Image (cartoon, rainbow, N blue to C red):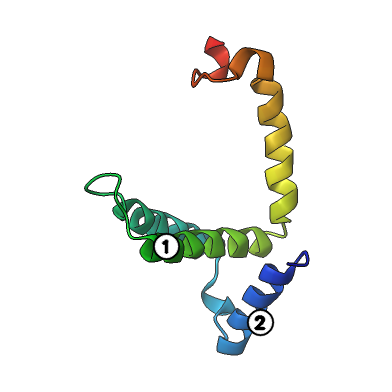
């Protein structure tokens, strides 16, 4: 999929429905939390889950995250890659491979 295709599709979807007026950072952040709760609900009673439900809820979380980043003038790919670089420095492979310890306990 070409870069920006998802963001372009989301922008068009929102514009067609005139929903941007509702997409304040606060509302989008609330929506992320609400949808994340629905994603977690897929695992409420154990590790078994319905793959279709999981895909839908994960898509909802990602959608609101992408819309929030866009609303704030941030490039989602860029901020994730920047954070990954910082996390990579905190968790060097030689100290963290196969371990779940926090960086200050490595």
**Viewed as shown, does residue 15 lie left or right of 89?**
left
Residue 33, x across and y down, in percent: 42, 54
> Depth check: 18 or 90 in front?
90
The label on residue 92 is: none
Give the alpha-carbon distance from disc 2 to disc 1, as whole Å. 21 Å
- Splitting the image into 4 quarters, where does residue 19 fall? bottom right
Whole-percent x, y for residue 86 in the image: 70, 30
- Give residue 12's mark: 2
Classify 10 Å Cα crowding around label 2: few (below 14), some (14-19), many (20 and above).
few
| Pointer 1 residue | 57
Q: Residue at x 73, y 43 (%)?
A: 81
Of residue 96 and residue 29, the one placed in the foreground of this image is 96
In the rendered view, tell whether residue 7 sits above or below residue 38: below
Q: Check the image and name the residue furthest to the left.
A: 45
Above or below 7: residue 75: above
Q: Secondary structure at mark 1?
A: helix
Quadrant including the C terminus: top right
Residue 22 spot, x, y in % from top left: 51, 75
Q: Are marks 2 and 1 in contact (CB under 8 Å)?
A: no
The secondary structure type at the circle numbered 2 is: helix
Q: Residue at x 68, y 69 (%)?
A: 7
């Amino acid at each position: 999929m070409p870069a920006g295709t998802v963001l372009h599709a989301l922008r068009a979807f929102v514009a067609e429905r005139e929903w941007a007026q509702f997409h304040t950072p606060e509302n989008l952040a609330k929506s992320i939390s609400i949808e994340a709760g629905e994603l977690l609900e897929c695992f409420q009673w154990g590790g078994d889950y319905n793959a279709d439900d999981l895909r839908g809820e994960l898509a909802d979380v990602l959608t609101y995250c992408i819309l929030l980043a866009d609303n704030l003038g941030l490039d989602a790919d860029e901020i994730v890659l920047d954070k990954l670089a910082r996390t990579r420095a905190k968790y060097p492979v030689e100290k963290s491979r196969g371990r779940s310890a926090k960086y200050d306990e490595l």
